[in-house]
Image (cartoon, grey):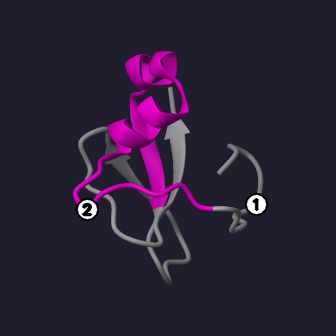
Amino acid sequence: KTPGQPVTRTAPLTFSPGATVADVAAKLHEDLERRLKTAKVWSAGAMAPKTVGRDHVLCEGDLVELQT
């Protein structure tokens, strides 16, 4: 998800079970992974995001906004 933009579902990134927020950042760009501080995660069916750390394990269908 792009910060400041509404929540929309686009083409998903796929990861192995147990993937973390840091894994998502690393797949997008190695510099992004180094600068990552927290993320907002919308779990399936959730209306509001939850702020999580870089080691948070993601579940299928989670929507992630990375924050540096």
Question: What stretch of residues is rendered in magenta?
Answer: 12-41
Q: Position of residue 61 (x, y in %)?
A: 47, 72
From the viewer's perspective, is 39 left or right of 17? right
Q: Is residue 46 above or below residue 21?
A: below
According to the image, label 2 marks what residue?
Answer: 17
Query: Is there CB contact under 8 Å for labels 1 and 2?
Result: no
Tell which circle, 1 or 2, labels the residue nearer the N-terminal end: 1
| Residue at the image point whose x is 50% and y is 26% from the top | 68
Instruction: For mark 2, give the secondary structure.
Output: loop
Mark drawn on residue 6 = 1
Three-letter code for the amino acid on which mark 2 is drawn = Pro
Q: Position of residue 21 (x, y in %)?
A: 36, 44
Query: What is the spatial separation of the Cα atoms under label 1 and label 2, in whole angstroms?
Result: 27 Å
Instruction: For mark 1, give the secondary structure.
Output: loop
| Residue at the image point whose x is 35% and y is 36% from the top | 22
Q: Residues within 10 Å of mark 1 (few under 14, many from 20)?
A: few
Closest to the observer, 1 or 12:
12
The stretch drawn in magenta includes residue 33: yes
